[in-house]
Image (tube, helix red, strand yellow):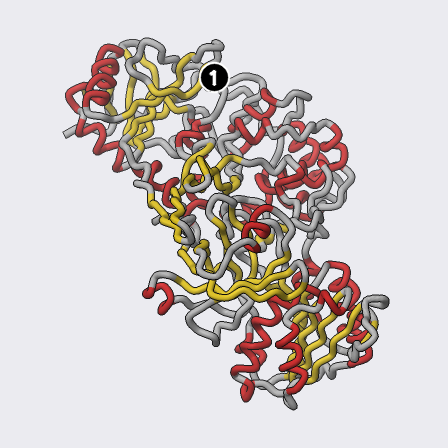
Amino acid sequence: MNVYQPFRVRVEERIDETPDTRTLRLRFLDEEVARNFQFRAGQFGEYSVFGEGECTFCIASSPTRKGYIECSFKTVGKVTTAMKDLEVGDEMGFRGPYGNHFPLDRMEGGNIVFIAGGIGLAPVRCVIWNVLDERNKYRDVMIIHGARSVADLVYKRELEEWGRRPDVRLWTTVDPGGETPDWKGEVGFVPAIVQKAAPAARDAWAIVCGPPIMIQYTLPVLQGLGFPPDRIYTTLENRMKCGIGKCGRCNIGPVYVCKDGPVFTAAELARLPKEF
Amino acid sequence: MMTNASQITQAGLSSLVEDLRQAGIQVIGPARVTDGAVEYQRLADLSGWTPGVQPRRSLKEWFLPVTEPLFRYRKQGPRVLVEELAPPDAPRVVLGAYPCDAAALPILDAVMGWDYRDDPWFARREATVILSQVCPGGDASCFCTDVGIAPDSAAGADLRMCPIESGWRVQVETGKGEAFLQQWSRHFQPANGSKNPLPPAGPPRSEAPRANPERVRAWIETHFEDPFWQEVALRCHGCGGCAAVCPTCHCFDIVDEPENPVQGARRRNWDTCQTALFTRHASGHNPREDQCGRCRQRVNHKFAIYPARFGRILCTGCGRCARTCPSGQDITEILARIDQWAAGPGGA
């Protein structure tokens, strides 16, 4: 079995997050693989539909939830369309986990602010559940999630659950014009809501993921609140094929997203050439 | 017991090739193809063998094929059977590899072997004995000596061959080479003056290096936004011909090729950083949205990124990119200009 041959996984559950975004829960067919599979929050994998091809996504479920992995994806191209067409019980491929991870051990005892835009909540959700499943290791947890419209908010059931928890401060927002008459959350772009929520920077870490434009405008807000760039983490997704540092396409200057990332600090991003 | 240097007559080489073939060992070497060009080809005998002419394409495709199946799949309703393929480890001998092609192989071992081991690559590497030849002389596009390689480099060679009056003088370079020589010793004779090294190679075409790689790397690492990259891109069609003929360009794509609705293979195909699709995201966003970024990437990868990570320049100076480019882009000119700026006031 060469390094490009995936594990076989079976679709166990399908959850429609938005009209064009779906989550698949996947279980490894091989009992031994299922038992031994381990990953860290932030790692990614290559998901494939046989006959269609491979796609790169983070693992959206938490490493604390054993026996399965989840991925959330937007239907955009050939492979994601094929993934959307899979039924419960259908088999597909997964290889991974690859890349680095969020350094949760460093964040123990601190406060964590999660900021996610749109489908960018997928990699962040993995860390959120990891933190909530080990809740006593961390102090304050704040989650800020924004989407273009109410219909575009992902993980709605989980947002409700987080909103009910007394140990989580949740802010949800939609872009102006994206609200519905009964929308109870915020209206405004993510950076503005971060400013409004004003998480304290002391002993705090920020994990930010979303469209490039959101990240670009959120970083200065966080730094204005006193978050140093080496305590702000994000995860990048460049086009990849191998996922293991060989196929030569995901690099940003000297840095390989698949090997040196996908998790980077804002301080690391500031040192990279503007090619992402 | 063989000494380190041996020799073999042309007739001996012919019978060696015949014996190898009988033993089921594939022989690969430079030979003319139908359009008159020389390519590395499978040889049945030495009748078409053309040492002394640099093949048009590099030796790379014998280790990283243009297209190769990684595994096969078969669908049965919701189930999928994944069929593992036997490793491509059929024994082979390359007879008369150019030093610039042989040298590319250990350079690529670094990327193929770090952390995750690229099994098909190493299966072919381990199954192949490389007899390189001392380069009989290059042309104006050659620049191996600029990148730390020489016409008589042993890098990547298990055995080195140099023409002598009575045939070839052969020198062992690796344990694998030694074992090969032992196994087929009946075709070889001890060389006259066996303690001496191979005869020196002819002078390389570029008398003085046109660029200092260290200086070039330092400049590239600090001039990502330099307008020079725009100028380089003006000449580039983005055809990727340079990457196709390059012995060290190894970027690849992974795609599924169904043969019918229920079965097919996942394949690895050559790819090139010179096309827009190479880096385009599903969203349409492209980190390298113009040819400037792509040309910069190719030079950067070869002369800065790869050396930084693996301690080796991703180039052997074979000159094929310059010979192939439809608009005459010459990497040595690019390096020379960079070096000039890097060496000048202000430098890197």
Could you say which is closer to the camera, residue B22 or residue B76?
A: B76
Please state the horizontal and vertical placement of residue A69, each as a whole percent of the image: 48, 66
In the picture, measured across the screen, residue B103 lies left or right of residue B286, that is: left
In the picture, measured across the screen, residue A164 lies left or right of residue B346, that is: left
Please state the horizontal and vertical placement of residue B312, each as a whole percent of the image: 50, 42
Give the residue type that dot 1 points to: Gly
In the picture, measured across the screen, residue B79 lies left or right of residue B210, that is: left
Residue projecting furthest to the right:
A177
Q: Which residue occupies 48% across, 43% down? A: A51
Task: Chain letter for mark 1, please.
Answer: B
Decide: is B49 above or below B182: above
Could you say which is closer to the camera, residue A75 or residue B315?
A: A75
Q: Is residue B111 visible?
A: yes
Tally of numbered tags: 1
Q: Which residue is mark 1?
A: B137
Please state the horizontal and vertical placement of residue A148, each as a whole percent of the image: 77, 64
- Determine whether the residue tagged by mark 1 lies in a helix, strand or loop: loop
Could you say which is closer to the camera, residue B52 or residue B239?
A: B239
Of the 4 image quadrants, the one containing the C terminus of chain B is: top right
Q: Is residue A230 visible?
A: no
Residue projecting furthest to the front:
B77
Q: Residues within 10 Å of mark 1 (few under 14, many from 20)?
A: some
Decide: is B25 above or below A213: above
Of the 4 image quadrants, the one containing the N terminus of chain B is: top left
Q: Which residue occupies 52% across, 82% down? A: A133
Q: Which residue occupies 64% across, 41% down? A: B297
Please state the horizontal and vertical placement of residue A198, each as a whole percent of the image: 78, 81
